[in-house]
Image: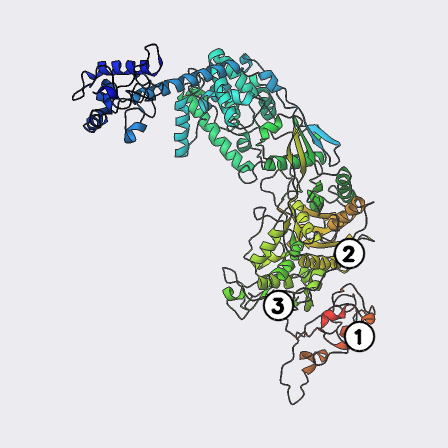
Amino acid sequence: MSEHRRKTPQPQGGGRAAARRAAQQSSGRRAAPSRGVTSESPSGSSGGDSPYGGRAEARRAAQRGGGSRRAAEGGGAGRGGGGRRRGGGDGGHEGPGRGRGRGPQRPAKKRFIDYPRAGKYGFRRWVPSWKLVSSLCVGFLGLLMGLAGIAYAMVEKPKVNEAAEAQNNVYLWDDGSQMVATGGAVNRQIIGYEQIPKAMRDAVISAENKSFDHDRGIDPMGIARALFNMAKGGETQGGSTITQQYVKNSRLSQEQTLSRKFQELFITLKVSNTMKKSAIMEGYLNVSYYGRGASGIQAAARTYYGKDAVDLNPSECAFLATLLKGASYYDPAGATDVDPVQATPQLNTERAKKRWKWILDEEVKDGRLSKAERVKYTEFPMPDPPKQNAQLEGQTGYLVELARQYFLANNKHGVTAEMLSRGGYQIKTTFNEKKVNELKNAVQKVYDSKIKPKQRPKTDTHVQFGGGSVDPKTGAIVAIYGGQDATKHFTNNANPTGAQVGSTFKPFVLAAAMEYGKRNPALSEDQSESERTKVSPLSIYNADNKLKIKKYNGEIWTDENGKEWLQANDGGESKGNITLREAMQWSANSPYVQLGMDVGTDKVKEVAMAAGLKDDEQMADSHVPSFSIGTSSPSAIRMAGAYATFAASGQQREPFSVSEAQFDGKTIYRHKDAPKHAFDAAIADNVTDVLKNVVEKGTGTPAQIPGRDVAGKTGTTDDNKSAWFVGYTPQLSTAISMYRLDDDATNKNRKFEKMYGTGGERTIHGASFPAQIWHDYMVGALKGKPVLTFPEPGPIGDKVYGGGAQSPTPTPTAPTTPSPTMSVTESPSMTESPPTPDPSETCGKFDWDCQQNNGGTNSGANGGGPGGGSTSPTTTPEPPTGGNGNGGGNGNGGNGNGGWFGGPTG
């Protein structure tokens, strides 16, 4: 290489020259094994500038597959030789002498976690090595073991004595004052292991946990066995061991969370490792809940058999072990407050007997009971009937139980009956103390003055009243009457009793006719659904006794046996063609049965449910005509709530009995107002106006409260087996029922008895004792309250004709020769309308309470002939109310009281 190309040597002490020389020397040493790569100058001159000696060779080497390794061995080809090029090479990929580093090449650092994996390409780069997987698994298990150890050290064993210290539940009136403190002084007494009979321990082990004596507190095989038996549908042991159940039952907090489950697991392990089996069994039987407010075996023995636990025999022990599976479904007394369908006394008794027998047989199989001993117990040990707390006598027990049921059914915190029995809850009810006492006194007044079981044992024994009172603006149940004494009569008469509601159901038929309308008889059933005529209360229907009921299309309705339906009226009265308003006033049955068929009984049911009745609360078969006149038997509370929907102009609110609940000072439940639109205000207000007329002029007159608007309806069923009055003011809706049973309420096969002669009355109607109780209660309950009026109803629907009543529209052709029967078939008022009177001299079209001239008693019939365009010659005069029905004529009594009911212009 020529001298003029050589650069001036740099001092050896440092700087670029030193770095260059070091790089060249290192490169030279590593280049020796390289193939086809030579150094041009031992002095480290820039011989690497040749276009072919360095980079090209390195590229070719890399392309041959050995670039990385060979370049690394060669010190890195390329730009490492001089100038500003970094020493050490660029991973050795470009051949000797031309690396990018400033110094000698270093080997690549080894990562602690080789992921993504170095030296791998494609998907293999992302597949973890077995070493990495193994390390992660070991690390994760170690972490879990560490956390488990910490959790195990932190948890404490259950303290049975603390769990036994149940508190009272405090029930409050609606104003916040205390009603009663009860429910938490639970019948619990801790007894020692030696006082627990061996038969009880054996029964529990055979029924709940066969491996108890040797398991470690958790039994995986037991869980699998329980699941297998459950799948087969047979009797099962619980999946949890006795130790697990002991831990669960002994804890004061009962929330169902994942963290709680893990905590219970560690407590179970600690209990199993640190406590003797005898101590676990003792604790379990002392804290378990056996129903009827009894926690612990001693309390259960006294509650169900009136004896100490030590005196129980094997048969009684087997029954008490049965209760541990769920007292609500195995107590023969039933628990309809928890489940009115599946927890009846009959079903509970069947379940209890089956499981009792199974437990005894399992004890024999397990060698815990000899066969000789087993044959002694063939008769089921029926427990004593429930006893009532003296604090809950009178109405208090009914109030507490109703609030308790409501809270258990509606709280969102998973509070169970067992948790509630432990106490500590403060429950504010909607009950008003003054109104509760007023209702109780109103009923007692009838009992004292009219019901004489000693004087009239055949007619006055087992007479029952029920009542419910609801605020229409909120849905709050402010008062109930459940019976004479909750400690003696165990059925709450404010709940469903089976007593049919009778004619108090008719307002729902009228509301359905206004809401959906009468079907067109000329169309098929499908077509008629889209062509309906909404019905006015002024519509005319036939009110004859034993009226032959027809389908909407005019066909005679028959049952499955081909039998026709002849609808009877109360007392066998026939009233001819009258308005629906008037039919409600006199409680005529045939017009509303036929109206229900014309509208559709399915629509009637829909309206009743929209108003607040429940399909699952003893709703009758809606496919028969009698559905429209009250064969259903909802509760007094539900009837009061449904009528409250009319009072609230169509806004429905669910009746409720608890406004707020607290536990440990924290609010865990608060009622939220959730009104629903049941039907238009025009419909509700027109129904109200019709029912107001019932109280003012019809069967409901005993319920009148001077100075206040009152709307209501009487109801009586066949053979006087039940009687109702349901009514309301703008502020309060109340339902009162009356019925008589052939035995007390504990009789499973009780039957409703006829009430002819009851209370010294020839017959019982809704207008008798129920209306009297309703009146006396409402007068007291509303005392001091402002006087409010109902909204004025607006026009609604069209005037239609049904049940055989014919429209008064004249035929287009007249006979040429007068007929002597003309006066019967054609009303004089049909052919010509009278002049329109001055507004100041007449009542408004919808002012049904207005009386024009207070006309003569039967003036329409005497002077004007049959009114209302009726074609039936059998029309009978109305009772003396001013010519209703027949007062449409122009006789000597003038137009009569509301005489326009009898005809289109009267």
- Residue 785 percent location from the top left of the image: 81, 46
- Residue 521 percent location from the top left of the image: 55, 69
> Vertically, is 54 above or below 342?
above
Work out how far the residue at label 2 is from the one at label 3, CA to CA, in angstroms: 28 Å
Q: Secondary structure at mark 2?
A: helix
Which amino acid type corresponds to the residue marked 2 in the rendered image?
Thr
- Residue 217 percent location from the top left of the image: 45, 18
- Identity of the residue drawn at 64% across and 34% down: 669
> Badge 3 is on which residue?
803
Q: Secondary structure at mark 1?
A: loop
* Mark seen at residue 701: 2
Number of marks drawn: 3
Q: Secondary structure at mark 3?
A: loop
| Left or right: 189, with 898 as reference point | left
In this view, the residue in front, 27 or 500, is 27
Where on the picture, by quarter, is residue 180?
A: top right
* Mark seen at residue 837: 1
First of labels 1, 2 by sequence position: 2
Where on the picture, by quarter, is residue 77?
A: top left
**Residue 739 in sight:** yes
Which amino acid type corresponds to the residue marked 1 in the rendered image?
Pro
